[in-house]
Image (cartoon, rainbow, N blue to C red):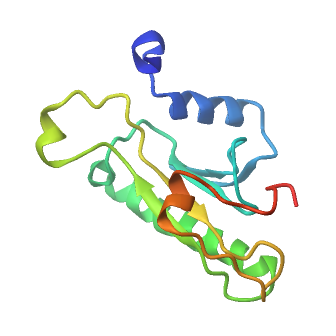
């Protein structure tokens, strides 16, 4: 288990390496958040939004982080809209530590993040809307992220 061996979540260490390398995959950043294209991206224009500190659940964000989140989301959506000069649709999902009965479990290995999966792959007029399983599980695609 990565967390046990390294003392930090894998995504947190990945984010630190991308930032240290001043990676071209970093799309946006502010004091509390970073948006990047993960090296394992499946879809063109796919991005991941990560907090700059280890946060497990969205309810752990302080007021400054919430304000910074609103700012970076606004900036990211504007960037998406500018790609094809149109309102750019996207699917977005938050992934964080389990809640409910799992609140008592050790979830330190979890790292809150959001994934964005836009359906406009080639132009403003050719969308490819993904089904739920395609977004996070079994992508079915006819195009590479580099296209």
Which residue is rendered at x = 67% and y = 74% of the image? 119
Toward the top, the furthest residue is 5
When the figure is inspected, residue 47 is found, relative to residue 26, above or below; the finding is below
**116 sits to left or right of 42:** left
Residue 11 in percent (x, y) is at 53, 34
Outermost residue, right direction? 147
Q: Is residue 142 visible?
A: yes
Q: Which residue lies at the image location 48% right of the left edge and 65% below the top edge?
A: 132
Where 143 sits versus 122, above or below? above
In front: 123, or 79? Answer: 123
Q: Is residue 147 above or below residue 37?
A: below
Residue 10's spot in the image, x, y percent?
Answer: 52, 28
Question: In the image, what residue occupies the spot 77% across and 72% down?
Answer: 121
Observer-nearest of 70 and 126:
126
Q: Quadrant of residue 80?
A: bottom right
The N terminus lies in quadrant: top left
* Rendered location of residue 110, percent (x, y): 38, 35
Q: Position of residue 24 (x, y in %)?
A: 82, 45
């Amino acid at each position: 288990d990565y967390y046990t061996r390294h003392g930090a979540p894998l995504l947190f260490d990945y984010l630190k390496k991308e930032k240290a390398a001043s990676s071209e995959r970093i799309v946006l950043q502010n004091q509390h958040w970073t948006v990047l294209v993960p090296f394992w991206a499946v879809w063109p224009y796919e991005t991941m939004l990560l907090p700059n500190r280890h946060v497990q659940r969205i309810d752990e964000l302080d007021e400054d982080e919430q304000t910074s989140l609103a700012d970076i989301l606004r900036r990211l959506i504007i960037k998406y809209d500018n790609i094809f000069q149109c309102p750019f649709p996207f699917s977005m999902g938050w992934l964080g530590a389990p809640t409910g009965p799992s609140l008592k479990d050790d979830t330190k290995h979890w790292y809150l993040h959001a994934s964005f999966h836009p359906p406009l792959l080639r132009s403003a007029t050719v969308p490819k809307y993904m089904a739920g399983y395609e977004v996070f599980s079994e992508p079915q695609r006819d195009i590479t992220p580099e296209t």
